[in-house]
Image (tube, rainbow, N blue to C red):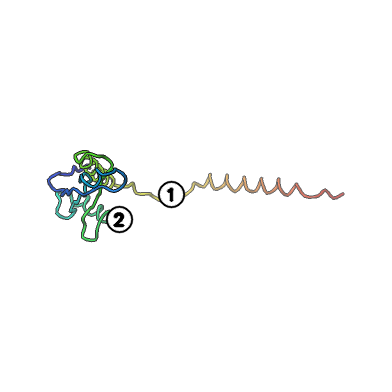
């Protein structure tokens, strides 16, 4: 069950990037601050619930996913990177984890385990001091 993100539901704002870059980093706003409101989106309800249930620091109390992309020097590449990361986050909750069912060991496997324990116990008992 894959859900694609509609780019129209995502709000981008250009911000100044951090880190090295000389004078250029002070002139150009090429980093991207992306906001995606999960509640107002067109995602299926099941995916919305699992996304909001995540304990991820990128999701606010109001249910808004906030991502910052500043890897590239290009604004467009940073937008694509932020969208790709958001899609990966949604895809991670789209797949339901398999439910684990508890199983019991068979009688034969229990018997074999106890027999091997008895046998190794007897072997260890033979390792004592020899008395005449």
Q: Percent from the top left, x then y, of residue 127? A: 75, 47
Q: Residue at x 14, y 54 (%)?
A: 40
In the image, is 130 to the left or to the right of 71? right
In the image, is 10 to the left or to the right of 111? left
Tag 1 near tag 2, CB within 8 Å:
no
Q: Percent from the top left, x then y, of residue 59? A: 25, 55
Label 1 crowd (10 A; few <14 / some 14-19 / many >=20): few
Q: Residue at x 43, y 49 (%)?
A: 103
Please identify the residue farthest to the right as the structure is shown.
Answer: 132
Instruction: Look at mark 1 in the image and give the residue it sits on.
Output: 103
Q: Percent from the top left, x then y, of residue 106? A: 49, 46
Q: Nearer the viewer, mark 1 or mark 2?
A: 2
Q: Percent from the top left, x then y, of residue 52? A: 24, 55
> Which one is nearer the viewer's eye here, 121 or 4?
4
Please identify the residue farthest to the left as the structure is shown.
Answer: 8
Q: Quadrant of the N terminus?
A: top left
Q: Residue 63 appears in which quarter of the rendering?
A: bottom left
> Which one is nearer the viewer's eye here, 64 or 21?
21
In the image, is 82 to the left or to the right of 105? left
Q: Secondary structure at mark 2?
A: loop
Spatial CA distance of label 1 from label 2 is 36 Å
Q: Secondary structure at mark 1?
A: loop
> Which one is nearer the viewer's eye here, 120 or 13?
13
> Which one is nearer the viewer's eye here, 110 or 51?
51
Please identify the residue farthest to the bottom as the structure is shown.
Answer: 61
Instruction: Look at mark 2 in the image and give the residue it sits on.
Output: 57
Q: Which mark is residue 84?
A: none
């Amino acid at each position: 069950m894959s859900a694609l993100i509609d780019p129209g539901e995502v709000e981008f704002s250009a911000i100044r990037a951090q880190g090295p870059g000389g004078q250029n980093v002070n002139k150009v706003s090429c980093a991207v601050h992306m906001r995606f409101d999960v509640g107002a989106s067109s995602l299926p309800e099941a995916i919305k619930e699992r996304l909001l249930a995540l304990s991820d620091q990128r999701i606010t109390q109001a249910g808004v996913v906030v991502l910052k992309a500043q890897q590239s020097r290009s604004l467009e590449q940073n937008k694509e990177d932020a969208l790709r990361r958001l899609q990966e986050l949604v895809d991670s909750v789209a797949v339901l984890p398999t439910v684990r069912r508890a199983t019991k060991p068979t009688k034969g496997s229990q018997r074999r385990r106890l027999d091997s324990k008895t046998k190794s116990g007897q072997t260890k008992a033979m390792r004592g001091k020899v008395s005449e």
